[in-house]
Image (cartoon, rainbow, N blue to C red):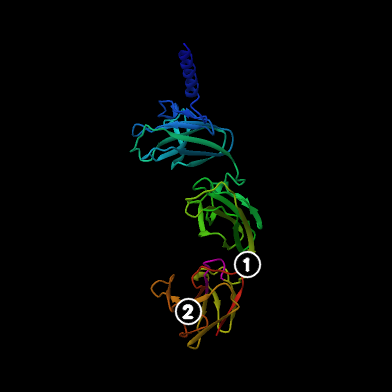
Amino acid sequence: MKNFIVSIILLSFLTIIISCGGSGGSDGEEEPNNSIEQANAVEFGTMFSLSISPKGDTDWLKVEVPEQGYLKVQANQIPEGIVPEVRFALFQEWEGRKDKELQAWRKIPAALHVREPGTYYLEIIDDYNDAESEQEISIKVEFVKEFDSNEFNDSPEEAKEITSNSDITPAIYPLEDNDWFKFKAEKQGYLKIMTKDVPEGIVPEVKYLVFDEWSDPKTKDIREWHTLPDACFIPKAGEYYIVLIDNYNDACSETPFKMKFEFVEETDKGEPNDNFTDAKAVQRGDTVKLMIFPKGDNDYYKINIKEGNKLKFSVKDFAGIKPMLKLFVIDSTETNKLKDYSDWSEFPKEFDVEAGIEYYILISDDYNDASSEKLFEIKIE
């Protein structure tokens, strides 16, 4: 009799454990859950067990999101051969396709930036649908409140306005996050961007654009991708756009970092002269003041040789760069194109020239990998 009572107590204890899903607050999937309508409800922070079996099995989950923020998905106890992937969706009851994709397939761990409260759906598969296992995977879904005060700014239409000499604290999260900003310039000059306290693994990179909602495409690049710190030449008053990413879109962090914008007024009177069509005219006896800024800056000048067969260039007061020069002439076969007249040369340099010909002078840093806001002088003789 005593043994019978002990057996009943043990059986009752085991029943309680099983009904509670075991220790750690774990829940298990309820089949069928192969469509968005059949999605299993999941609580934030609770381990949820599911298995990918048979091959091609797809498991749908759903969570209730309280506000703008981030949905994070993690997995452990993953069976050998299984590579779990997730995509996020909304349920469209009255549409032909019931699931509205919010983010395409990502390997777990993954995250989704959520704009508003509501029910959000997760579909989990093996990455190529070519593996199966009856062993259960532990899935954990968490919600993180918004920590980037600039969001949402994932498109030029949503760009966050910044001002000269302003500081912001963006975060590059989740993976492939794009952050857009816009800046109103009142005059020609340079927009400098600097960062500090950048999380390990993140390499911030920016591109500069102008935006016109009536054009196709709506954006036009004015300076290609550059890692920070960086600066962009602003040719005239107007509104300019900046997009910020991780350099290869393969890293993200929940830790915001500091980003500073600074407008520098123009001091190089030759600008804009980044193209030979904007070359500034000079002559023998001139002393030209210029600067190589920002990184990659090219400065063109042109000189019409009226007499003599020599042309000499000297330089002084440069710092932080190594100025080089090269001569070109107009291509006789294509009047809108230059052809080389000389190789790249260091200063000082004297060239043999011919009277009656117009020469174009290109000046830049030797490897286009340095710049300086300091004006320096070039003497032409």
- Residue receiving disc 1: 266
Q: Amino acid at mark 1?
A: Glu
Within-10-Å neighbours for mark 1: few <14, some 14–19, many 20+: some
Left or right: residue 34 versus residue 276 is: left
| Secondary structure type for disc 2 | strand
Prevailing SS of the magenta stretch: loop
Label 1 or label 2, whichever comes before in sequence order: 1
Outermost residue, right side: 165
> How far across and down, in percent of the image, does residue 88 sit?
47, 37
Q: Residue furthest bottom?
A: 308
Which amino acid type corresponds to the residue marked 2 in the rendered image? Ser
Q: Position of residue 89 (x, y in %)?
A: 47, 35
Residue range in magenta is 292-300
**Does 81 appear above or below 223?**
above
Identify which residue, 260 or 266, lies in the foreground: 260
Residue 35 position, x and y percent, is 41, 29
